[in-house]
């Protein structure tokens, strides 16, 4: 099936940059970050509204009201919007609020029923749909998720590499296992490949190193968690960077076209 490379629509001279907080927390927080990212390398503003937490009892997202804050952020900054969806109900709400990019999280990609349900409700959509790798290093599960989206005739698909869980502690929060996304990319060369160094590293001081590795491998984009006051973030505090640090990151990163 032919998949149009939707990245061309952005007419970018640099990688696609998706940035914004791990979670939408308050209207003020969402608007402050979006304004700080306006007029930068960022094209798409991300924020989690429904947060899949590994264990119960933590902050699980603000829910639908966050979609209103995001809409306001788009009106005021012109940034496109991306949210995580984990079921058909999330998708329907996100579409009601005209969210531009829907991403499927790592804990959802492991569940073929959930991916299938999301694919069916998005049948034929023009929205951009991004599929994160599954939490576990299972290439087939990631491939299967892409195939489900393709069978639903979703035209603008991309994949996000966010690393893989390991029982042993490593220097990464989620081990990159670079060979897995590279193999996926060789099977689906037309699908933009985006790296999420925030969830790979879990630490803000490693974001630059992993972003550079991704660009050296000719990834098409980066998704980076960004917060005006990272230490006070309600989720993933240790890995978020400020908009100022993000802007400096793009001054420092070397964009190389290795395979072109
Ligand atoms: C996120 O992007 O905030 C998130 C929950 O990511 P992942 O699905 O990669 O854990
Ligand atoms: Mn996060």
Image (cartoon, grey):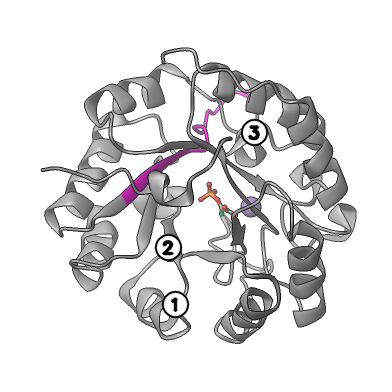
Q: Position of residue 34 (x, y in %)?
A: 73, 66
State the extent of the magenta-drawn residues as a range: 157-170
Q: Main secondary structure of the magenta part?
A: loop
- Mark 3 and mark 2 lie on one chain; the one further toward the N terminus is 2
Q: Between disc 1 and disc 3, whose residue precedes?
A: 1
The structure residue drawn at horizontal position 30% and vertical position 29%, both measured from the top left corner, is: 139
Measured along the vertical axis of the image, is residue 197 above or below residue 69?
A: above
- In terms of image quadrants, where is residue 91? bottom left
Asked if 217 appears above or below 238 in the picture, the reply is above
Quarter containing the C terminus: top left
Q: Quadrant of residue 16?
A: top right
The relative height of residue 248 versus residue 74 in the rendered view (above or below) is above
- Mark 3, Cα crowd under 10 Å, few <14 / some 14-19 / many 20+, is many
Q: Which label belongs to residue 102?
A: 2
Residue 25 x %, y %: 74, 73
- Residue at which label 1 appears: 94
Helix, strand or loop under label 2: strand
Binning the other alpha carbons within 10 Å of mark 2 as few (below 14), some (14 to 19) or many (20 upward) gives many
Measured Cα–Cα span from mark 3 to mark 2:
24 Å
- The answer to whether residue 171 of the structure is visible from this angle is no
Q: CA distance from mark 1 to mark 3?
A: 29 Å
């Amino acid at each position: 099936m032919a998949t149009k490379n939707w990245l061309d629509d952005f007419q970018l001279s640099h990688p696609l940059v998706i940035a914004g907080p791990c979670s939408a927390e308050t209207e003020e927080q969402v608007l402050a970050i979006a304004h700080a990212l306006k007029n930068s390398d960022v094209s798409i503003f991300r924020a989690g509204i429904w947060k899949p937490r590994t264990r119960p009892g933590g902050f699980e997202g603000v829910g639908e009201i966050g979609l209103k804050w995001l809409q306001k952020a788009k009106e005021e900054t012109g940034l496109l919007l991306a949210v995580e969806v984990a079921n058909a109900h999330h998708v329907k709400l996100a579409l009601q609020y005209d969210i531009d990019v829907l991403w499927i999280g790592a804990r959802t990609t492991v569940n073929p029923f959930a991916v299938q349900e999301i694919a069916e409700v998005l049948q034929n959509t023009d929205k951009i749909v991004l599929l994160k790798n599954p939490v576990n290093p299972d290439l087939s599960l990631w491939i299967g998720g892409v195939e489900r989206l393709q069978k639903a005739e979703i035209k603008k698909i991309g994949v996000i590499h966010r690393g893989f869980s390991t029982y042993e502690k490593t220097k990464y929060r989620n081990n990159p296992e670079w060979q897995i996304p590279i193999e996926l990319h060789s099977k689906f060369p037309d699908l933009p490949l985006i790296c999420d160094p925030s969830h790979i590293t879990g630490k803000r001081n490693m974001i630059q190193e992993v972003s550079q590795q991704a660009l050296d491998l000719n990834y098409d984009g980066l998704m980076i968690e960004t917060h005006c006051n990272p230490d006070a973030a309600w989720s993933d505090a240790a890995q978020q960077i400020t908009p100022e640090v993000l802007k400096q990151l793009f001054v420092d990163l070397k964009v190389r076209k290795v395979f072109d």
